[in-house]
Image (cartoon, grey):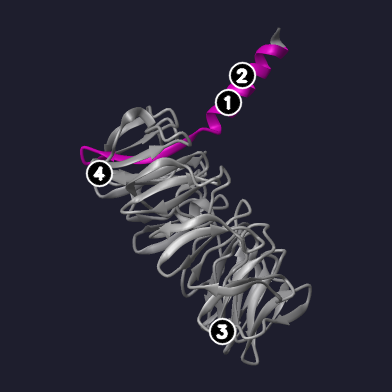
Amino acid sequence: MRTVLSLLLTLCLTVSYAQELALVRDNDLFGYINKSGEYVIKPQFESAKSFSEGLAAVEQEKKWGFIDTKGEWALQPEYDKVKYFNSGYALVLKNDQWSYIDKSGQELKVPNTEKYYDFEEGVALIRQNDKIGFIGTDGQIILEPTLDEIKTFRNGYAKVRNGELWGMIDNTGKTIIPIEYEEIGNTFNPSGVYGKKGGDFGIIHNGSFNVIEGADKVWNFHGDSGLTYARKDKKIGFVNSKGAWVIAPAFDKARAFSNGLAPVAKDKAWGYINTKGETVIDFQYKDAEVFAANGLAPVKEKDWGFIDTSGTIIIPTNYSITAGLAFLSGNDDKGFIGDLARLKSKKGWGYFNEKGVLLGNKWYQNAEPFVQN
């Protein structure tokens, strides 16, 4: 019996910890709701941030602290400014000095730096003598400051610059793509990374630079479609890892493939094609975005709504849409993030599920994406 009770307690704690909460504003005060639309922490804060790694920053009497998912103080409000927790640490400003703290408020000792950067994916940048490197969560240097620029790490990789040329490293400091390109994509994908070298655009894949014939612009690979879009003679088509045109450049605009379909535009109208370049959903929209994992995509007539992969309207085109927060969601996709979409009407912001039902039948002054804790 004791074993069963222990297991049930563990499951309950796991479910509690894994809950997803969203920051909302109602009657000019901020609080947090769960995915049932219930207030877990009632609106009571004049300023607040979304949860990150189980804690949320809130302001009280012009000082910032952090609360837990029960609304109790985890770190008392004693900071002038705070950032989000990432990799176990958050940047905080106190007495005109930035520092990294863990969830107990303990400061992390780090090397001298000319500027403080947030931790992301287990590393934080440091700047010394106008050169950039990074440290780990133990505060020790992983990569000495030898580079001119390091962009945001995405899934363990970051584009970097020395002088006028770009390459890519991983979060151990290993060079993944040599620093020899005039341009380079900011997202590593197994299908490749676009680059520009010697004036030519191409795909960097398995150590080779595959030139795309005639291309003057290329976009990042997205997901696992194996195709990305590129421009030639003012028209956009799709290429593969070898830099070969798979779908001829015939469109005015395009976005990435997802669920086997890509939004493309001709003559100011958007529709969707398959990986053979065949029209699957007719050109009829003012704008269109990529399909989410749940098979729904935002489309615009007068306003925005959602269709499924057959083109059937699931959520009427009566709303505004917004991109998710990149630092939380890991991307800037619009529309559904997980099983909910954040939409705006004249009544305010609300959350819709995949059936087009408004969560809790409730609109808010502001509504941020749900974050798992």
Amino acid under disc 2: Leu
Q: From which residue to which does the magenta span run?
A: 3-29
From the top left corner, tell me how far across and down residue 37 is, in percent: 39, 29
Q: Residue at x 58, y 25 (%)?
A: 13
Q: Is residue 81 visible?
A: yes
Please tell me how crowded label 2 is: few (under 14), some (14-19), or many (20+) other residues with Cα within 10 Å: few
Q: Residue at x 68, y 57 (%)?
A: 224
Drawn side of residue 220 relative to residue 177, left or right: left
From the top left corner, tell me how far across and down residue 158 is, in percent: 61, 69
Please tell me how crowded label 3 is: few (under 14), some (14-19), or many (20+) other residues with Cα within 10 Å: some
Residue labelled with disc 1: 13
Judge whether 280 appears above or below 202 on screen: above
Residue 216's tag is: 3
Query: Which comes before the other along the chain, label 1 or label 4?
Result: 1
Q: Is residue 321 magenta?
A: no
The span from disc 4 to disc 3 (Cα, nearest Å) is 48 Å
Judge whether 155 appears above or below 252 on screen: above
Nearer to us of marks 3 and 1 is 3
Drawn side of residue 113 relative to residue 179, left or right: left
Assess whether mark 1 and mark 3 are in contact (beta carbons under 8 angstroms): no
Residue labelled with disc 4: 46
Residue labelled with disc 2: 9
